[in-house]
Amino acid sequence: MPSEETEVVVVGAGQAGVAMSEHLGAHGVPHLVLERDRIAERWRSERWDSLVANGPAWHDRFPGLEFPDVHPDGFASKDQIADYFAAYAEKIGAPVRCGVEVTSVRRHTGRPGFRVRTSEGSIDARFVVTATGPFQQPVIPPIVPDGAVHTQIHSSAYRNPEQLPDGAVLVVGAGSSGVQIADELRRAGRRVFLSVGPHDRPPRQYRGRDFCWWLGVLGIWDAETPPRGAEHVTIAVSGARGGHTVDFRALAGSGIELVGMTASYDHGVLRFAPDLGTNIALGDEKYLAFLRAADAYVERDGLGLPEEPEAHALGPDPECVTDPRSELDLADAGVTSIVWATGFAADYSWLDVDAFDENGRPEHRRGISREPGVYFLGLPWLSRRGSSFIWGVWHDARHVADHIATRRSYLAYASDERPGAALATQHN
């Protein structure tokens, strides 16, 4: 059976794939976007019910379309975000094929391009863009054996408190997902333990401006490399209930017991690292440094933003921080569920090309792979700090599309497609 042909195959129709399609379309580049489920499927089926965006609607969007039913300063729900990307794909006429899974990509031998094998047949393409993003395989550390508690799930499988059996819950991970899930469970009347690791916790708002605005004016979004040792540090920020600053002291005051990083398990007892106070203090330090940078910016530019001295007052540490629990007997504490908000790993087993380092991580420069013709999009720090955010991936996609268009022009020069090529052939 003959293979279908196109110039570019984009794998994945989430925010990265839709953005890529827009820019390829603007260049007039023939392409297909292949999606194994629906457009923005992870927003629909791999997030909890009450999730909202962590950035306001004026910021977390593409330039060509606003959210229709969300106030600019509001936070879109997960379903509104999924609908937004589906509407955007329709608006730009993106050639998305849903229900098509890519099973392998291999370079042709003796001719340019790649053979893309899918659940619906094969496609030959000159270029391949991997737009599957960073959230592919949920990671659950092998600490607590199966059967030790009634339920262990990753945050991507958590939906709501009613999903879990009666009893206390341990939430492992203090990034945006972990703190929001822990808070929701506590508000539902559960006893909750929250295992807190290293984190960054910016203010939701400061001096009348959202933290996304501050990251922009302070140039933090444009940072090209993460601080040393902070490549994978989680950010604790929330758009829930209209948006608020994540405050671990307030979480403890509401009844959530904070514990250190989950370290080991033995015969029903979970042990925690003695790092809770340090993790809270380092998070506080980053928070206060952010406020000082914002204050310096206001003073330097003479902005009339209202002062907010109370934001600098942290208050005393709760007892669970000053005298932290070192271990927890799960049965005695009534813990029946563990929710692992511990991130994701990438899965490129289908991409059989020379584009990875010795640890299996993509080697690229601003999304341009070391394997000619292969590109990556939607990864953290692809070009800068904002790369894995909705607006950031749109700008990265433009750079990748520009590179593809430039490569096509060079390739066309060597063929009869270049301007004047046919006339030159006639004169010879």
Image (cartoon, rainbow, N blue to C red):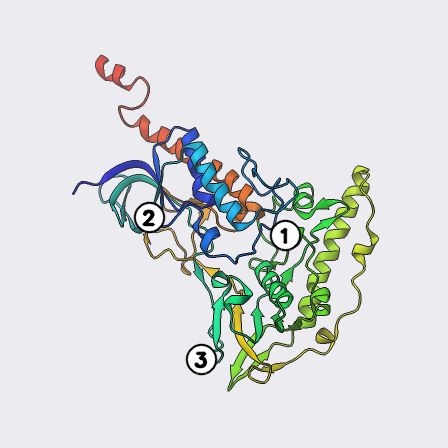
Image quadrant of residue 315? bottom right
Image quarter of the N terminus? top left
In which quadrant of the rendered view does residue 45 lie?
bottom left
Q: Position of residue 200 (x, y in %)?
A: 65, 58
From the image, tell me which residue sits under label 2.
99
Are the residues at dot 1 and dot 2 in contact (C-beta closer than 8 Å)? no
| Alpha carbons under labels 3 and 1: distance apart | 34 Å
Q: Earlier in the sequence, mark 1 or mark 2?
A: 2
Q: Is residue 132 left or right of residue 226?
A: left
Q: Which amino acid type is marked by label 2? A: Gly
The residue that label 3 is drawn on is 147
On screen, residue 51 above or below 416:
below
Above or below residue 412? Residue 211 is below
Residue at 55 percent across and 47 percent down: it is 389
Q: Give the labeled residue for mark 1.
A: 239
Q: Is residue 400 visible?
A: no
